[in-house]
Image (cartoon, helix red, strand yellow):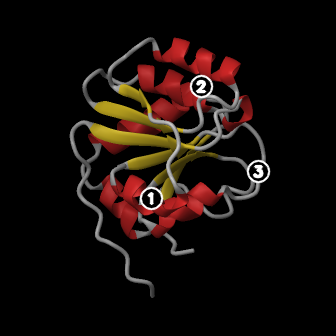
Amino acid sequence: GISRPARKAPRRPFRIGYIGTLIPHKGCHVLLKAFHALPEGQAVLRIYGDTGQFADYTAELKAIAGGRRDIEFLGTFPNSAVAEVMAELDALVVPSLWHENTPLVVYSAQAAACPVVASDCPGITGYIEDGKNGLLFAAGDAEALALRLRRQIDEPGLTAALSAQAKAP
C-alpha cells in the first residue's frame, strides 16, 4: 500500500474544514448552521475557498458566521499545499446539496487519512462508507451534520478509527 503520514490525534478545539467553491449547491451554509449548534469552544471551522468568486453568497456565509472568532475564512491555497492543509484538520466536511462526481477534495482528504463528513449524495457515497472511512448525513440537514460532528468531538478514538480506514485513491 501507499504509506501515509500518521495522523495527529484530534486536538482541542476539534478542527473542522471546508475546502471548495463558495457556491450554494456546495452547501457551506449548511455547515455553518451545524457549527453554530456545537458547544462553543469545542471546535474551530476553517473555510477555504475564493471569497470573491460569488460575492453575494460569500456575504451570506459571513452573515451566518456572525463574526465568530472560531470561524475563519481563509481564501484559497495552491494545490501543492493540500496535504499540509489536510494534516491540520480533524475532519473535512463536504456538505454538497446534490449529486456530484466524487469531489477531488474527498480523494485528497482520504490520501491524507483525514476523515470525511459528507452529504449522502451519489458520487460521495460510492467512496465514503458511513462509520468506516467517514460519516454521512442527509444532504441539507444541518442538525444531522451537527450530530456527526458532535460524535467526533465526544467519542475519543472515532476520528482515529475513521482515519485508519481511509481509502488511498
Going from N to C along the chain, the mark reached first, 3 or 2, is 2
- On residue 27, the disc is none
Residue that label 1 marks: 81
- Describe the element under mark 1 as helix, strand or loop: helix
Mark 1 and 2 residues: CB-CB less than 8 Å, in contact?
no
Residue that label 3 marks: 100
| Amino acid at circle 1 | Ala
Instruction: Inspect this view and state whether residue 64 appears.
Output: yes
Q: Residue at x 57, y 39 (%)?
A: 49
Number of marks: 3
Gap in angstroms between the C-alphas marked 3 and 2 = 18 Å
> Quick check: 113 left or right of 118?
left
Mark 3 and 1 residues: CB-CB less than 8 Å, in contact?
no
Q: Residue at x 43, y 20 (%)?
A: 36
- Describe the element under mark 3 as helix, strand or loop: loop
Q: Residue at x 34, y 54 (%)?
A: 159
| Amino acid at circle 3 | Glu
**For the N terminus, which image quadrant?**
bottom left
Residue that label 2 marks: 29
**For the C terminus, which image quadrant?**
bottom right
Q: Nearer the viewer, mark 1 or mark 2?
A: 1
